[in-house]
Amino acid sequence: MSIEIHVTDDLGETQTLTGEPGGTLMELLRDESSGVEGICGGCAACGTCHIVVDEPWQAGLGEPGMDEQILLEALNERTSGSRLSCQLRLAPEMSGMSLTIVPAEC
């Protein structure tokens, strides 16, 4: 079952990406859009996969783990919908989700 994610990338362009269950959201965004680097390879160590999930989808993702929460707290552009896409596994219930990629902080 394919999962559709609606993405506004770091250039302000909106597109719909299609992924398969099991991979991380970071991998999909890094490979198919603009703005997610994923420098640490998904270890929740760099913040280059920072996204903001639209409000209606936030509760369904559960709470960030401790490592993710610590890194999110250090980011300047953090909002209530901030997540690290490397920490989110694609699942069928995410189909239709909307998010915005946050430009990497220097």
Image: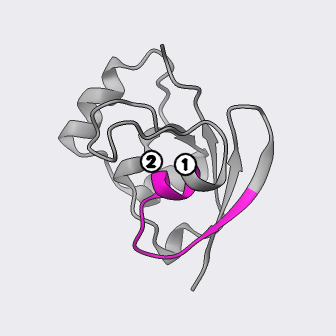
Residue at x 46%, y 72% (from the top left corner):
91
Q: Which residue lies furthest to the bottom in this view?
A: 1
Compared to residue 30, the image places residue 16 above or below, namely below
Q: Bounds of the magenta span?
A: 16-29
**Closer to the camera, 66 or 24?**
24
Magenta region includes residue 27:
yes
Q: Residue at x 52, y 76 (%)?
A: 20
Residue 22 x %, y %: 40, 73
Q: Which residue is drawn at 23% across and 46% down?
A: 65
Q: Is mark 2 on a helix, strand or loop?
A: helix
Query: Can you identify the residue that label 1 sits on?
Result: 30
Answer few, some or many: residues within 10 Å of disc 1's Cα (few below 14, many 20 plus, some between 14 and 19). some
Using the numbered discs, state the Cα–Cα distance from disc 1 to disc 2 in whole angstroms.
10 Å
Q: Is residue 24 above or below residue 52?
A: below
First in sequence, mark 1 or 2: give its number.
1
In the image, taking residue 98 as reference, residue 61 lies left or right, namely: left
Neighbour class for label 2 at 10 Å: few (<14), some, many (≥20)? many
Residue on which disc 2 sits = 85
Q: Position of residue 55 (x, y in %)?
A: 58, 45
Q: For marks 1 and 2, give the one nearer the viewer.
A: 1
Q: In which quarter of the image is the N terminus?
A: bottom right
